[in-house]
Amino acid sequence: MDIIPAIDIIDGCCVRLSQGEYDRKTVYDTDPVDVARRYEDAGLKHLHLVDLDGAKSGHVVNLRVLERIASSTTLIVDFGGGIKSDDDLSRVFGCGAAQVTCGSIAAKEPVTILRWLETWGPDRLILGADCRDGKIAATGWTETTDLDVEDFVSRYLRAGFRRVVCTDISKDGMLCGPSSALYRRLISSMEAQGLVMELVASGGVSCVRDLLDLRDSGLKAAIVGKAIYERRVTLEELVSIEGDASRC
């Protein structure tokens, strides 16, 4: 199971929101590059980097942060937030992102996202399925659509996506445990349809037990954010879980 630390960026700082609300923001560090280096030094291999300024404004804002992290570390960076055009996507890859998480644009512009998938392939593009009460959310989680999360994921898996990051917004930043029932339902539904999915949990992780439960439930990876900043889990524990393949 991959353990993926998250760095969310507003105004160049590492922040966490509560339930996706921008007015419930906590700043944890002013130097995201230093935070990324700490993750790398501990032995973690991946990073989920979110441009919250970009997600809200509809265009990529924090490219410089991405570029600095990618050039200063060997972390495998997946980047999301504000990617709306071919130029945005090319610039993000050009600044060092290994992968891009596509959320709002998948909800709003399926023709564009399918064209990107054909060009870049499923190894470079990740489907972002962020939801509130079972419905897909977009535009930095400020808008909830009528799209059912299971139908949304199924449609894009059939189109060729493999890896899906799913966030239950009600859990995000709350340290109340992940949305395990949602993930089990998604896994069961996709298996019943014969679809291959690499599901990544995001939101709510509060302790090591949460991660072990997710792994035992069949999750391929989990994103951890606030629990690291609040010292609910240590980097050493995260590396240990990632390195233990015996129960994956």
Image (spheres, helix red, strand yellow):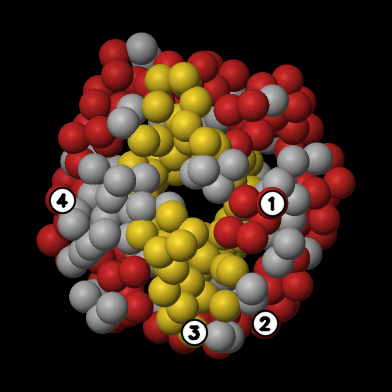
Q: Distance between the residues labelled 1 and 4?
A: 36 Å
Seen in the picture, residue 238 relative to 150 is either above or below; the reply is below
Asked whether disc 3 touches disc 1, contact meaning CB atoms under 8 Å apart, the reply is: no
Q: How far apart are marks 2 and 4 (CA)?
A: 33 Å
Task: Give the mark, 1 or 2, whose residue is nearer the N terminus.
Answer: 1
Q: Residue at (44%, 68%) from the top-left corner?
A: 25
Query: Which residue is identified by label 3?
Result: 29
Question: In the visual, does 12 lie left or right of 137?
Answer: right
Q: How far apart are marks 3 and 4 (CA)?
A: 29 Å
Query: Which residue is identified by label 2?
Result: 72
Outermost residue toward the top? 193
Q: Nearer the viewer, mark 1 or mark 2?
A: 1
Residue 160 picture location, percent across and down:
58, 24
Between 179 and 16, the one lying in front of the other is 16
Q: Nearer the viewer, mark 3 or mark 1?
A: 1
Q: How crowded is mark 1: few (under 14 residues within 10 Å), some or many (20 or more)?
A: some
Residue 240 picture location, percent across and down:
26, 72
Q: Distance between the residues labelled 1 and 2?
A: 27 Å
Query: Which residue is identified by label 4?
Result: 213
Q: Which of marks 2 and 3 is in front?
A: 3
Q: How crowded is mark 4: few (under 14 residues within 10 Å), some or many (20 or more)?
A: few
Mark 2: secondary structure: helix
Q: How crowded is mark 2: few (under 14 residues within 10 Å), some or many (20 or more)?
A: few
Task: Give the mark, 3 or 4, whose residue is nearer the N terminus.
Answer: 3
Q: Residues within 10 Å of mark 3 (few under 14, many from 20)?
A: some
Q: Residue at (67%, 55%) from the top-left corner?
A: 54
Mark 2: amino acid: Ser
Mark 4: amino acid: Asp
Mark 4: secondary structure: helix
Query: Which residue is identified by label 1?
Result: 57
Mark 1: secondary structure: helix
